[in-house]
Image: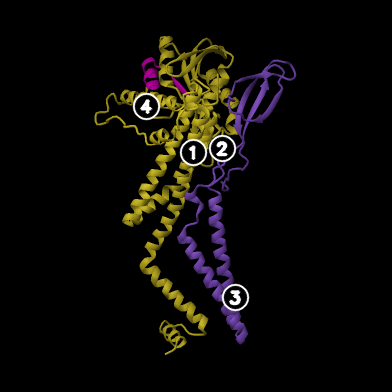
């Protein structure tokens, strides 16, 4: 499946971008004011403004990264599908990646060990992450 | 009056005092309070609209990917002379009108007829779009197109309510949409992963029943029964079992209703029991691939096959048992999970238990493996 996102989804919403830009601008102003306050000797106000500026800056960057991550998660990932090939006579078993044309109970080439025809016995995908139980 | 004096006057009015920072914060608090008092619901609605819009973008992306995969698969497998895009776009807008139910007598057969016409029409369309494809590939392409069609439909319905909600600025339309969105998205994502499985001909979770039947009848001679199904006569625990499944390995669910009816009639109703095996929807908290058994016709879809099976069973007084493999909607239409593939042996054990407990030696039984047999031969 294609790994590129379509133009419809590649952009971050203008509304969100506008809010983020405003907050960044305000946080920069707060930081500048804090420097100003420090110069005039008002350390308490400078401290407040510094905290407000940094928090606002951090929040806007976080929101921006979150929306980018959401776009990244929009890609449809094709799961890895495996095919189990077995020899019914000697029990020789091998697991390989799925190839187009594979189906369960399809006859394949001769077994490496006993020369009997091998068949596909299973085709499946493995899901790595465990389902959350929410403690119940 | 300068700005700081004005600030001070305003904050003093609301009982605030102190340095300029606390004055600003105090005013900010009152402004936010007043804005939320009058525009709280509207702000909440805009937040919901943003959320729906985000999901709509995702749905659009999934739908476009679905269309792209479908066209690429048709070009790759079917080797058409002309570009199939226009035909695919036309196909995505296909609709089926349900029969009139004001007088419900005979509606099952009317619906059955409409579904038959739809199926044959779609198969013909696929053959035109992909002339180089064989019967198995035609079935797989038909399934791929149906998944793309489902995605297109989901996108259009959500878009409809989103635009309607924005037009009317109705909180209740937007709220309903936002509430069902997680379930809709889950379904859409399931169809998205189904697309690849159908295009490649990989077995899907819904094929659990078909896989069990295939394992039981593998190595025995099969014959075709109506419609698009196969049956094999297999000795099982001292009984004669007629094992039925849809004909694979192409994407096909067959018509198990007609198949069961014809096998029962061939045996003049002398069937000790019918056992149906299917994938069953699990509840949250249940394990994928868990096996459960019960009573009744285990078969989904529009209900036509279930009706036909129940009708035949009632006519000949045949008991019916069901064994299901639990999975959720996402697992049912995406490539088969290992847990489901591994559950096949447990299902066979359960079926054997039912046979030993509920029938006598020498009896004839019917075992039906229900589900899409894509990627599963016989």
The answer to whether dots 4 and 1 both sit on one chain is: yes
- Between the residue at mark 3 and the residue at mark 2, the CA separation in whole angstroms equals 51 Å
Q: Secondary structure at mark 4?
A: helix
Q: Tag on residue A124?
A: none
Which quadrant of the view contains residue A28?
A: bottom right
Q: Tag on residue B68?
A: 1
The answer to whether dots 1 and 3 both sit on one chain is: no
Q: Position of residue B250 (x, y in %)?
A: 51, 24
Dots 4, 1 in contact, CB < 8 A: no
Hue used for the chain lettered A? purple
Give me the chain that's yellow.
Answer: B
Q: Position of residue B46 (x, y in %)?
A: 40, 59
Q: Secondary structure at mark 2?
A: loop
Residue at position x 40%, y 11% in the image: B265
Q: Which residue is mark 2?
A: B287
Residue A34 lies left or right of residue A110; in this view the side is left
Q: Which residue is mark 3?
A: A50
Q: Position of residue B375 (x, y in %)?
A: 55, 26
Q: Secondary structure at mark 3?
A: helix
- Between the residue at mark 1 and the residue at mark 3, the CA separation in whole angstroms equals 51 Å
Dots 1, 3 in contact, CB < 8 A: no
Q: Chain of mark 3?
A: A
The answer to whether dots 4 and 2 both sit on one chain is: yes
Comes first in the chain, label 2 or label 1: 1
Dots 4, 2 in contact, CB < 8 A: no
Mark nearer the viewer, 3 or 2:
3
Label 4: few (<14), some (14–19) or many (≥20) C-alpha neighbours in 10 Å:
some
């Amino acid at each position: 499946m294609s790994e590129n996102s379509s133009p419809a989804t590649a952009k971050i919403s203008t509304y969100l971008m506008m809010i983020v830009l405003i907050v960044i601008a305000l946080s920069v102003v707060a930081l500048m004011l804090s420097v100003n306050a420090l110069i005039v000797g008002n350390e308490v106000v400078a401290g407040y403004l510094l905290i407000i500026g940094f928090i606002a800056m951090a929040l806007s960057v976080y929101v921006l990264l979150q929306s980018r991550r959401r776009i990244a998660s929009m890609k449809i990932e094709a799961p890895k599908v495996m095919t189990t090939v077995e020899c019914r006579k000697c029990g020789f078993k091998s697991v390989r990646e799925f190839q187009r044309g594979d189906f369960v109970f399809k006859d394949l080439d001769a077994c490496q060990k006993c020369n009997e025809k091998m068949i596909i016995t299973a085709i499946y995908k493995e899901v790595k992450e465990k389902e959350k139980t929410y403690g119940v | 009056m300068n700005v700081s004096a004005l600030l001070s006057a305003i904050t003093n009015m609301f009982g605030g005092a102190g340095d300029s920072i606390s004055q600003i914060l105090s005013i900010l608090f009152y402004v936010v309070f007043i804005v939320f008092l009058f525009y709280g619901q509207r702000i909440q609605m805009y937040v919901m609209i943003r959320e729906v819009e985000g999901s709509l973008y995702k749905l659009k992306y999934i739908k476009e990917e679905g269309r792209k995969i479908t066209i690429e698969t048709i070009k790759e497998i079917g080797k058409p002379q002309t570009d199939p895009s226009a035909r695919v776009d036309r196909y995505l807008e296909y609709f089926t009108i349900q029969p009139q139910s004001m007088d419900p007598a005979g509606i099952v057969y009317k619906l059955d007829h409409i579904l038959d016409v739809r199926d044959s029409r779609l198969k013909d369309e696929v053959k035109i779009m992909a002339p180089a494809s064989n019967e198995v590939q035609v079935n797989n392409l038909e399934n791929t197109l149906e998944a793309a069609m489902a995605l297109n439909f989901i996108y259009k319905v959500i878009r409809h309510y989103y635009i309607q909600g924005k037009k009317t600025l109705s909180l209740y339309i937007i709220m309903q949409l936002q509430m069902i969105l997680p379930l809709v998205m889950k379904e859409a994502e399931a169809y998205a992963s189904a697309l690849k499985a159908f295009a490649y001909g990989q077995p899907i979770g819904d094929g659990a029943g078909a896989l069990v039947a295939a394992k039981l009848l593998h190595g025995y001679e099969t014959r075709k029964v109506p419609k698009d199904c196969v049956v094999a006569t297999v000795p099982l625990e001292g009984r004669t079992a007629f094992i039925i499944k849809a004909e694979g390995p192409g994407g096909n669910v067959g018509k198990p209703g007609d198949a069961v009816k014809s096998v029962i009639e061939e045996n003049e109703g002398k069937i000790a029991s019918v056992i149906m095996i299917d994938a069953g929807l699990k509840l949250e908290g249940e394990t994928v691939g868990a096996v459960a058994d019960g009573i009744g016709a285990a078969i989904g879809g529009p209900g036509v096959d279930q009706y036909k099976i129940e009708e035949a069973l009632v006519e000949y007084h045949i008991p019916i048992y069901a064994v299901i493999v639990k999975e959720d909607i996402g697992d049912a239409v995406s490539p088969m999970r290992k847990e489901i593939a591994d559950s096949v042996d447990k299902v066979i054990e359960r079926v054997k238990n039912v046979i030993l407990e509920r029938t006598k030696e020498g009896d004839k039984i019917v075992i039906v493996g229900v589900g899409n047999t894509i990627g599963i031969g016989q």
